[in-house]
Image: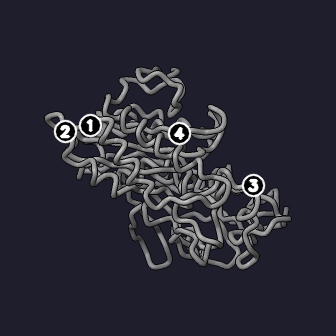
Amino acid sequence: MKRFDYVRPATVTEAVAAAAQPGAVYLAAGTNLLDLMKGNISRPDRLVDVTHLEGLDAIERLADGSLRIGALVSNADLAHDADFARSYPAVAEALLSGASAQLRNAATVGGNLLQRTRCAYFYDTASRCNRREAGSGCDARGGENRTHAVLGWSENCIATHPSDFCVPLVALDAIVEIEGRGGRREIALEELHRLPGDTPERESALEPGDLIVAVRLPKAAREFAPHSRYLKVRERTSYAFAMASAAAALRIENGRIAEARLALGGVAAKPWRALAAEDVLKGVAPTADAFQEAALRALTDAKPSGDNAFKIELARRIVVRALTLAAAGTPARLPALPASPFAPTSGAIHA
């Protein structure tokens, strides 16, 4: 591991100033960053420790009905917050489907949003990777790529974003609060992550020194709680990233879908909002035919980036299954196997 400086600022303002320097990165739980540093994939000159900063570890219900989640709230604390799980069940289900219990206890909300791709060529410093070294090439294009992107990819990068948490957040119009050198600003979570295009080394809309301080869910997101699910298909049931996933949320009135929200994970370099599919569902009855049509619309622009054409059909089927589960109603308790297609729909959560 490369030698680095360690800085422990006392305030958010000091943290932003320290992290704006070239070669600086933020350190929270480090569940992804430290692995990258040990493998010489990430070689920062300075770590800016934000774990002790005040005001970043609270879950707050705001006066306008929205929910504000501090960037240092742990994945486990958020998922097991009773009010949060009732109000945003698909988000809680997504959180509990990710990693192991030990990692969820440490991992933070802000860090989850910014975790790096799990592409094997990104992790292998002997391979060419445009994300790791701009302009070097992409060995994944001609390599083992069955898990790679089928939406939004370019010749420069076919990696996928690994977060489960981000998928239902994007579906529910989450907002990210950012503190930067120019002060506080907000962006839609859907705009935080970038598609690779010609600059895959630029993975997000963040500028040097920018610190995510909170994520906010709007009041309207709670209206989907009765019909909201997250479904994830992976190569093994636990401790694995999604081959493909879907977050589906419906607002059903008088037997018809008044509003639909749908996002996919594991298929692109960012959580993929399926707006065309949402439009198809609005105003129709929640039937198998409607869900099949929505799945086709969600993957209209999909194309293989290698030996992964099967992921397109897999993603379609996941969309149909997620919508079907959402229409049937959110379980009273989270399943013991969160987000798994093998979990019974009634489910139970381990105390």
Amino acid marked by disc 3? Glu
Task: Please tell me whether residue 3 is drawn above or below residue 107 in the rendered image.
Answer: below
- The number of numbered badges drawn on the structure is 4
Q: What whole-number distance in Å separates the C-alpha atoms at marks 3 and 4?
A: 22 Å
The residue wearing badge 1 is: 286
Q: Earlier in the sequence, mark 4 or mark 2?
A: 4
Q: What whole-number distance in Å separates the C-alpha atoms at marks 4 and 2?
A: 26 Å
The residue wearing badge 4 is: 232
* In this rendering, position of residue 300 left or right of residue 157: left
Q: Earlier in the sequence, mark 2 or mark 1?
A: 2
Amino acid marked by disc 2? Arg
For label 3, the crowd category at 10 Å Cα-Cα, with few meaning under 14, some 14 to 19 and many 20 or more, is some
Looking at this view, is 67 or 166 the one in front?
Answer: 166
Find numbered disc 3 in the image and state the secondary structure of the residue it sits on.
loop
Q: Earlier in the sequence, mark 1 or mark 4?
A: 4
x, y percentage for residue 259?
Answer: 24, 47
* In this rendering, position of residue 22 left or right of residue 182: right
* In this rendering, position of residue 253 left or right of residue 334: left
Q: From the viewer's perspective, is the residue at label 3 or at label 4 nearer?
A: 3
Within the image, what quadrant is residue 268 found in?
A: bottom right
x, y percentage for residue 81?
Answer: 43, 34
The residue wearing badge 3 is: 144
Q: Are marks 3 and 1 in contact (CB under 8 Å)?
A: no
The residue wearing badge 2 is: 256
Amino acid marked by disc 1? Pro
